[in-house]
Image (cartoon, grey):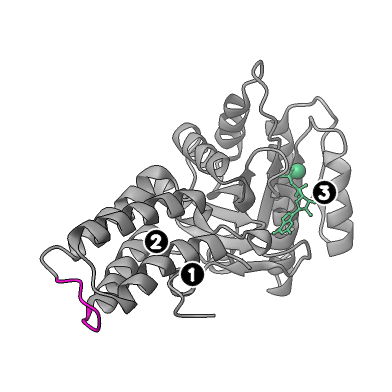
Amino acid sequence: MVFDLLKGAIGGLVERIRYRSLSREELEGLLNNMLVDLIAADVAYEVAEDIVEGVRRGLEGVKVERGSRVESIVLDVLRVKLLELVNRRPIDIIEVVKAKCLKGEPYVIVFFGVNGVGKTTTIAKVAYMLRENGITPVLAAADTFRAGAQEQLEIHASRLGVPIVMGRYGSDPASVAHDAIEYARARRLCAVLIDTAGRMHVDYDLMGEMRKIVRVSKPDLKILVVDALTGGDAVEQARRFNEEVGVDGVIVAKVDADVKGGSILSVAKVTGKPVLYVGVGQGYQDLKPFNPFEYVDTILGLKP
Ligand SMILES: Nc1nc2c(ncn2[C@@H]2O[C@H](COP(=O)(O)OP(=O)(O)O)[C@@H](O)[C@H]2O)c(=O)[nH]1
Ligand SMILES: [Mg+2]
């Protein structure tokens, strides 16, 4: 089940506290177990430590006795701690696109992320969501490197019935982004969705290329896509992209297959940016607005 490991890490502590009185030493042992369990659930070390420390402090001077209010103290502390990590001001893409469109300018979104995380699929889902709301975006196939990248996006564009601006393989991705924005201006389209390359080779400056795309396209929104299943890698990617290019929001893909659940917490913490949507499958409709309260309640076992 989705998020099972993270739920277990937190539920384990709550369960034990529910049924018996604990000495300080026993409580300390349980908190250490929780730390290890959180890390196993893809929660970054610093984040896990922060959560455990919060609970420790919340229970300071409280007698951990069976039948006491300890369980609800722990749940309250955890809820506050977890919300602190994920509850950031959300961005409603439909609204911001419409607002800019009223000024006669297209809203430009660049999508970053390393190969295979789900970038291109996510762009297709966002295009679908815009179409459902009466907005026709143009797609920019600014991954001019990976074999098949242009065609993959082209197939989505034709299925979705939205225009696409493509580039020759090996050509400058920033110029493809630029052309797509011009295309949108000329046709009064309201949104430009820019797909980018994500190869991570030692002899190649991905961040330099992304910075150039940003310089040229001056995006309204920079979205990082990460893969929930990659755990620590997702966290490292989030840190790097945020430091080097700057991200405004994150989309976490493949949450439907995520049995651990900690990537979302950790990525939110290291970027300090909102998780905007989560990908929950391979279909166009499988993009859900991220709801921090629902997420936290799910982890705390307060919601099925
Ligand atoms: N289960 C699942 N698979 C996804 C999701 N998003 C993308 N994928 C799959 O992940 C693989 C890589 O996706 P792609 O969009 O090509 O990644 P990119 O290299 O970052 O552009 C494809 O097989 C997608 O169908 C998701 O939310 N859930
Ligand atoms: Mg791609």
Q: Is residue 190 in view from this perspective?
A: no
**Secondary element type, mark 1:** helix
Judging depth in this view, the residue of 12 and 190 nearest the camera is 12
Sequence-first tag of 3 and 2:
2
Q: Is mark 3 within 8 Å of ligand 2?
A: yes
Q: Circle 2 sits on which residue?
A: 88
User: Which residue occupies 63% across, 59% down?
Assistant: 258
Residue numbers of the magenta segment: 63-69
Residue located 23% across and 75% down the image: 70
Q: Amino acid at mark 3?
A: Leu
**How far apart are the two marked residues, 3 and 2, measured between alpha carbons?**
31 Å
Which quadrant does ligand 2 occupy? top right
Q: Which mark is residue 153?
A: 3
- State how far apart marks 1 and 2 are (Cα): 13 Å
The image shows residue 61 at horizontal and vertical percentages of 10, 66
Q: Quadrant of the N terminus?
A: bottom right
Query: Could you tell me if the residues under marks 1 and 3 are in contact, i.e. CB atoms within 8 Å?
Result: no
Whether residue 169 is in magenta: the answer is no
Is residue 270 found left or right of 173 in the rendered image?
left
The answer to which quarter of the image holds residue 170 is: top right
Q: Closer to the observer: label 3 or label 2? A: 2
First along the sequence among labels 1 and 2:
2
Check disc 2 and report its element: helix, strand or loop: loop
Secondary structure under the numbered disc 3 in the rendered image:
helix
- Is residue 236 depicted above or below 108 in this figure? above
Relative to residue 194, is residue 154 drawn left or right? right
